[in-house]
Image (spheres, helix red, strand yellow):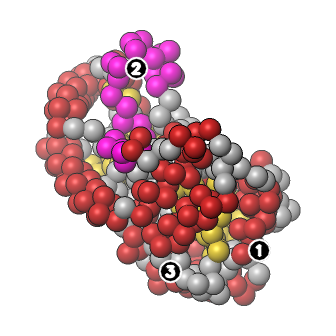
Amino acid sequence: MQHGGDLSKAIAAFGGTESDWMDLSTGINPVAYPAAEHITARGLTDLPGERAENALIEAARQAYNLSPNSAIAAAPGTQAIITALPYLLGANCSISIIGPTYSSHEESWKGAGATVQCISKEQAHEATTDHLLLVNPNNPDGHIFTREELLKLAAIKQQNGGYLIVDEAFMDLYPQASIIPQIKDLPILVLRSFGKFFGLAGLRLGFLVGPKEVTEKLQNQFGSWAVSGPALDVGRAALADLNWQTEMRSSLKSEMGLFSTLLKDQNISIVGQTDLYILIEHPLAHPLHNALAKERIWTRVFDFSENWMRLGLPAADSDRQRFAKSFKDALQTVEDHAAF
């Protein structure tokens, strides 16, 4: 599976309707920010205006604790930034990507003609390529690089004129670990996703933080009205709503604690996690994925690993209980079949 979240593939293969399915194939918050309260009529009918754009950017600067000399650009989702970034930095270059991680990074750089090396986190300090890219917290295992580690890696890139690129798609969960406040004059580019933590992936909003010469190139490439009026309205309100964010972090931590306990009770090995997804290991992960799909539960497995499965957070206690029963039955089915 290249990406999670597309139930049409699940329905085509296993039947049912969308209402039948529990989608655990993404790391998107199942409890969304109340967006409808903040979408204005003018946001829907008028072209996006400079005033609304500036208000969104200011809210993002405050939420992400940007240093004064860091610039920020808004985009219609971080996926758009991932696609554009190789061309902004010059596609005729080399980059090391710490993995395994979100596959679109490698695909975008290779598609642009860059020389790409996939390395482990232990090899990061020895990377000699122009640029170095990592996801923090990493997707799918949740590994978090410390600020100290990142600053050392950025200093190495500064010596050879390249960039450290940090995808902080899930960093809203752990703002204290973000490298953004520490960027200062270092060659660091940070991608921030809006839709995952706020549960509004369909809104399509993301940000690039870093040196002004790069963020301005991104803005120029996207041109006028890149971010929709509703995204401007909702993004500004959500990023400024610090109480909602604090309460949501606490709630997600509690819910993931219950979910991980459920899995441990089934003697499942946990490779890593964040408060929005958990990576488990089982020798029959792919058959288990199919067995759960027959129960209308969609999970995430990976082409590069026969043993890994990633699970998003169930939306409510009833979903967690449904998963517990289905998972126990599916596990029994695949293990019994394997015994023969």
Q: Is residue 22 visible?
A: yes
Residue 52 lies left or right of residue 108; in this view the side is left
Q: Amino acid at mark 3?
A: Pro
Residue farthest along the left direction in this orientation = 265
> Along the polypeptide, which appears first: circle 1 or circle 3?
3
Mark 3: give few (<14), some (14-19) or many (20+) Cα within 10 Å: some
Q: Is residue 34 magenta?
A: yes
Crowd class of label 1 (few under 14; some 14 to 19; many from 20; radius 10 Å): few
Eyeballing the image, is 163 above or below 235? Answer: below
Q: Confirm whether the magenta stretch covers residue 280.
A: no
Q: Which residue is mark 1?
A: 213
- Give the residue furthest to the right: 92
Say which residue label 2 marks.
Answer: 18
Which quarter of the figure has residue 54?
A: bottom right
Mark 1 and mark 3: span between their CA atoms? 18 Å
Q: Is residue 205 left or right of residue 16?
A: right
Taking the spot 53% from the left edge, 40% from the top edge, the residue there is 41
Specify the quadrant of the image occupied by residue 123: bottom right
- Residue under pointer 3: 181
Residue in the picture at 33% in, 60% down: 245
Q: Does the CB distance between marks 1 and 3 fall below 8 Å? A: no
* Residue stretch rendered in magenta on the structure: 7-35
Which quarter of the rendered picture does the C terminus lie within? Answer: top left
Return the x and y of residue 34 as percentages of the image width and height: 36, 45
> Between tags 1 and 2, which lies in front?
1
Q: Secondary structure at mark 1?
A: helix
In-image side of 162 versus 74 (left or right): right
Element at label 3: helix
